[in-house]
Image: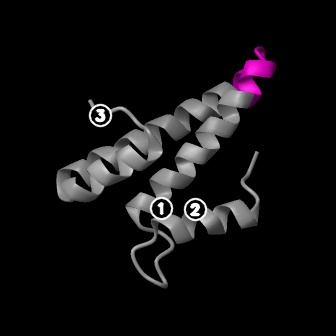
Amino acid sequence: MALDSAKKQEIISKFSRGEKDTGSSEIQIALLTQRISNLTEHLKMNKKDHSSRLGMLKLVGQRRSLLKYLKRTKYDRYTKLIKELNLKDK
């Protein structure tokens, strides 16, 4: 269920802060969001795929911790990111 390289490069170019930025929190959160949405669609069709469900829950937890870090350190970037990705703010 990995992202294809073209889609990954598109996300990286959209959310990167600079030319060589590939691992910032914003990019990681955007990539995790894309993987979670892909897994969600997969799980709608395959309801008994429990191993994929557990993997998705791990990804959700990882994204939550990255969002918490971004909210704590750079709140303006956090608000911009959740608005672009249509995520809820707790």
**5 left or right, relative to 66:** right
Q: Is residue 24 above or below residue 3?
A: below
Mark 2 burial class by Cα count in 10 Å: few <14, some 14-19, many 20+: some
How far across and how far down the image is residue 18, in percent?
42, 81
How far across and how far down the image is residue 57, in percent?
55, 30
Residue on which the image places disc 2: 11
Mark 1 burial class by Cα count in 10 Å: few <14, some 14-19, many 20+: many
Name the secondary structure under disc 3: loop
Mark 3 burial class by Cα count in 10 Å: few <14, some 14-19, many 20+: few
Q: Is residue 57 above or below residue 84?
A: above
Give yes or no for contact between labels 1 and 2 (Cβ–Cβ under 8 Å): yes
Q: Nearer the viewer, residue 85 or 37?
A: 85
For the C terminus, which image quadrant? top left
Query: Which disc, if any, is residue 27?
Result: 1
Name the secondary structure under disc 1: helix
Q: Which residues are magenta?
A: 42-52
For the N terminus, which image quadrant? top right
Q: Nearer the viewer, residue 78 or 1?
A: 78
* Mark nearer the N terminus (1 vs 2): 2
Residue sitting at x 28%, y 58%: 77
In reply to whether residue 61 is colored magenta, the answer given is no
Query: Which disc, if any, is residue 89?
Result: 3
Residue sitting at x 72%, y 24%: 43
Chief SS of the magenta region: helix
In reply to whether residue 46 is colored magenta, the answer given is yes
Q: Is residue 72 above or below residue 46?
A: below
Callout 2 amino acid:
Ile
